[in-house]
Amino acid sequence: YVLAKFFLSLTKNDPGRWTNKAGWLTTDTVCNWKGIICNNDQNVTRIVLNDNGLVGDIPTEMSLLTDLSHLALSKNGISGTIPTEIGLMTVLSYLDLSKNNIRGAIPTEIGVLKKFEKIFLQKNDIMGNLPTEVCNLSLLKELQLSENLIVGTIPEEIGKMTSLEGLIIKGRKGINVMKGIIPSTIGLCTGLQRVEIPRNEFSGSIPSEVGMLSDLEHLFLFENDITGSIPSTLGSCTSLSQLALSQNAINGTIFSEIGLLTNLVDFIADSNEITGSIPSTIGILHNMTRLKLNNNEMVGSIPTTLGSCTSLQDLILDLNHFQGNIPSEIGFLGRLEILSLGLNKIGGRIPSHLGKCKNLKTMILSGNGEISGTLPSELGSLSNLTHLNFMDTGLTGTIPSEICSMQKLINLDLKTNFEANCV
């Protein structure tokens, strides 16, 4: 009866809508129907019908499937709300309703389902607050609510979710409106590996208690309203591989303890109000592939220790107040693809060692009026270079013939006091 109701409700009485309906509503045992898995007692324990053309509402009668532990209905056209009767499905541990058209609020009754381990509700039209009752799910490992219409704050009670590994609430560009501070109690979720809450309106500072998350791998806070400095306690998060903080109002300096994050691959903190210099300890980060600090208020010289970041592919430091020379040690970065240092106060000559960066595709030094001397001919050996911009620098002389003959060069932007000898 329950599965018949399920079928009729999610076909809108048009069985032809389903991509695969093998066995459904036939005399064959329900355990042989497409997407149905049973236990030894022939009771339904799993329904897996992802991307199968389901449309309509989830019937309330689903609560009668008291042995159901796994419900996976993602990538369909399911509408309506999550029935409050879900609170009666006491063995449910896995729920995936992502990428549907579900609306309404997350029912508070979900908080009584103590066996829940994973909830995937991303890419729907779910509204309302994140109910505090969700924080009663002490076994929950994954909470994925991205790209909905959820509002309100992250409850302080989140600290009770000691098994949580992934908290993922990515905002829908221009719509999502989760606000408030990131509660300090998040530090009690010591199993957290991923905190991904970008494109919201979270404010306040990053709590220092984040440093208690020793298993943290991804911290994505970009496109919020976060202020304050990056806490030095993050240096204790030695598993961290991706730190994305761009487009906030973060200020203060970069903590010297960043050198402890030896697993860091991406450090992206552009478009903030960060001051001070790049700490020399950054040279310890041999696994880092992207360093993006453009559009801040940083000063000082580019540290020579960056030459030890041998995995670096993108070095983007535009729109700051960096001074001094371009370190010749950057020539040790054999994997570097983007070197963008425009609109700073960098001076001196362009080091010929940059010609050793054989993978370089883009070099932007424009807007540094103190850069002087001539273009080193060694740059002509950068056979992968497509974009070269030296506008508004103090470079003089002729363009070396080696650069004129670069096969892949698409854009060559130079100041007019160069002699135009390229044919």
Image (cartoon, rainbow, N blue to C red):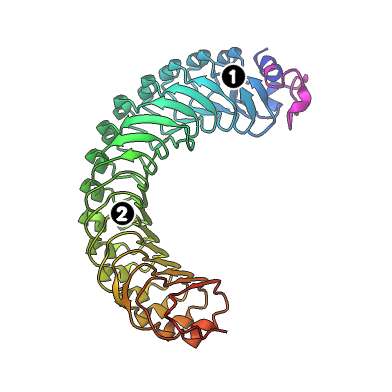
Position of residue 387 measured from the top left corner of the image (x, y, whole percent): 50, 70
Q: Count the numbered circles shown.
A: 2
Q: Nearer the viewer, residue 420 or 37?
A: 420
Residue at 26% across, 31% down: 185
Q: Nearer the viewer, residue 284 or 351?
A: 351
- Give the residue at mark 1: 80
**Range shown magenta:** 9-28
Position of residue 350 measured from the top left corner of the image (x, y, whole percent): 35, 78
Task: Write down the quadrant of residue 96 in the picture.
Answer: top right
Tag 2: Cα neighbours inside 10 Å, few (<14), some, or many (≥20)?
A: many
Left or right of residue 336: residue 285: left
Vertical side of 342 occupied by 264: above or below? above
Left or right of residue 19: residue 269: left
- Give the residue at mark 2: 296
For mark 1, give the secondary structure.
loop
Image quarter (top left, top right, bottom left or bottom right) of the N terminus: top right
Vertical side of 26 occupied by 207: above or below? below
Residue at 38% across, 44% down: 222
Upstream in sequence: badge 1 or badge 2: 1
Q: Nearer the viewer, residue 63 or 11?
A: 11
In the rendering, which numbered label is found on residue 374? none
* Kind of residue at badge 2: Asn
Residue at 39% across, 77% down: 354
Task: Write down the quadrant of residue 314 in the picture.
Answer: bottom left
Q: Is residue 90 magenta?
A: no
Q: Main secondary structure of the magenta part?
A: loop
Image quarter (top left, top right, bottom left or bottom right) of the C terminus: bottom right
* Kind of residue at badge 1: Gly
Of marks 1 and 2, the one in the foreground: 2
For mark 2, give the secondary structure.
loop
Q: Is residue 19 magenta?
A: yes
Position of residue 200 measured from the top left corner of the image (x, y, whole percent): 40, 35
